Amino acid sequence: MDKILKIGGIVFVVALLIYALASLGKDETTQWDKNFDSSSRSPFGLYVFNKEVKNLFKDKFEKTSQPPDIYFIEKKSKPRNIILIKNKLDLDQWSAIVDEVSAGSDLMVFGQNDIPKLVSDSLGFEHYIVSFDDSNILKLTDYKFENSYLNLNKFPGGDAFVAVDGDFRILGKTVLKNKEQHANFIGKQFGKGHIYLHSEPLFLANYYMLKSGNLQYVQNVFSYLPDRETVWFSEVEKKEQSRSILRFVRANPSLRYAANLLLGGLILFAIFNIKRKQRIIPMATPLKNTSVEFVRSIGNLYLQEGDFHEMMAKKAQHFLYKVRLELLIDTQNLDEDFISKLHLKTGKPVDLIREAVTMLKAAQDPYAQVMREDLVKMNTVLDQILS
């Protein structure tokens, strides 16, 4: 198992390095999705507009993500400008806005694809996609702004108003490549207030706001709103989504790469640890055979004491024990019969055996005088007989 874990670790590290190198050398791709997010710096986000909008309305401006029906209840009802940019609102929220307009507020809406059909029918307009050209020209029709136009050369929506009631005034048009013109900016009085509808919100995106000359078109469009308090309902429909941590992570490239690496690491860890780890069994050290060390220690003790007679007696006792055990010869009497049997069993010379018997008897005699040399000689002779 340890070997598998090591291999898995090496594979993970190598994969991590390859991914990191690939990420470093990878160019960030431009996101051309039309998100209309006020915090997004992508081409079709509203980051620049979010920074400049206060100047457009001379700081009489408020941005909120609070739903309109709740906002108007908490805020004292009074005439104000209301801005919506690609908002997905329900009927209750639209009803609150329409009531505010009837009471004297002015509403300017950019992007009609998200207006419920019931609301558009009650206001008296219909809109469709009239062009799939790769570029459109936006122009204002009021004589005051006859030279105010803007070129949409990146993914224009091509949406326009094709049916409006007689109360609406056409304030701007989309000019197609074939020179056809369709209303894209309309307005009318509604109760005590006014409603303005623009079918192409793309000109408010970062990509077009940063182009030279386009800001004048933006200012001219907003000039239809009076100089008073203005509220922008920004990203009301995204309120619940913004609470998602995953959405925040996926929106940031660095966090997205880190999350992918973490997920890959967890998957590899799970793969190589799917089997239960076995507890390490400790190595048991075998018991040592200390018999030889014991005998050596005893021998050294006798040698240091100089008791050669006792050592010869032990040697003789051990020799006779082996003769009884291995050769099956009775050792009670060390006589001629013993010498003859030992000669026949071992095949050793009789003289050698007689010499060994003499030494054995001396070792068994407690009064015999022996020397170191006698011990050495006896050890040599007895080893020769049983070798």
Image (cartoon, helix red, strand yellow):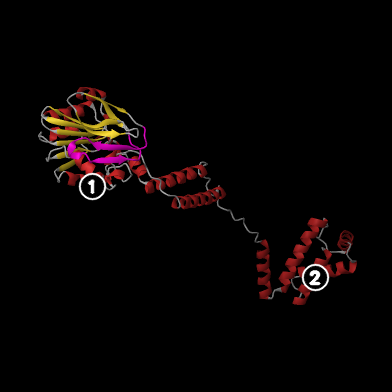
Q: Position of residue 82 (x, y in %)?
A: 17, 35
Q: Position of residue 69 (x, y in %)?
A: 17, 31
Q: Which residues are magenta?
A: 132-157
Q: Is residue 307 left or right of residue 221?
A: right
To which quarter of the image does residue 317 belong?
bottom right
Residue 184 at least partly seen: yes
Residue depth check, mark 1 versus mark 2: number of the one nearer the observer: 1
To which quarter of the image does residue 38 belong?
top left
Q: Between marks 1 and 2, how big is the CA–CA gap?
A: 111 Å
- Which residue is the site of mark 2? 380
Q: Dot 2: few (<14), some (14–19), or many (≥20) neighbours within 10 Å?
A: few
> Circle 2 — which element?
helix
Task: Classify the position of the C terminus by image quarter.
Answer: bottom right
- Which residue is the site of mark 1? 51
Q: Nearer the viewer, residue 220 or 14?
A: 220
Q: Nearer the viewer, residue 95 or 368?
A: 95
- Residue 147 belongs to the span the image colors magenta: yes
Vertical position of residue 2 compared to residue 111: above or below: below
Amino acid tagged 1: Lys
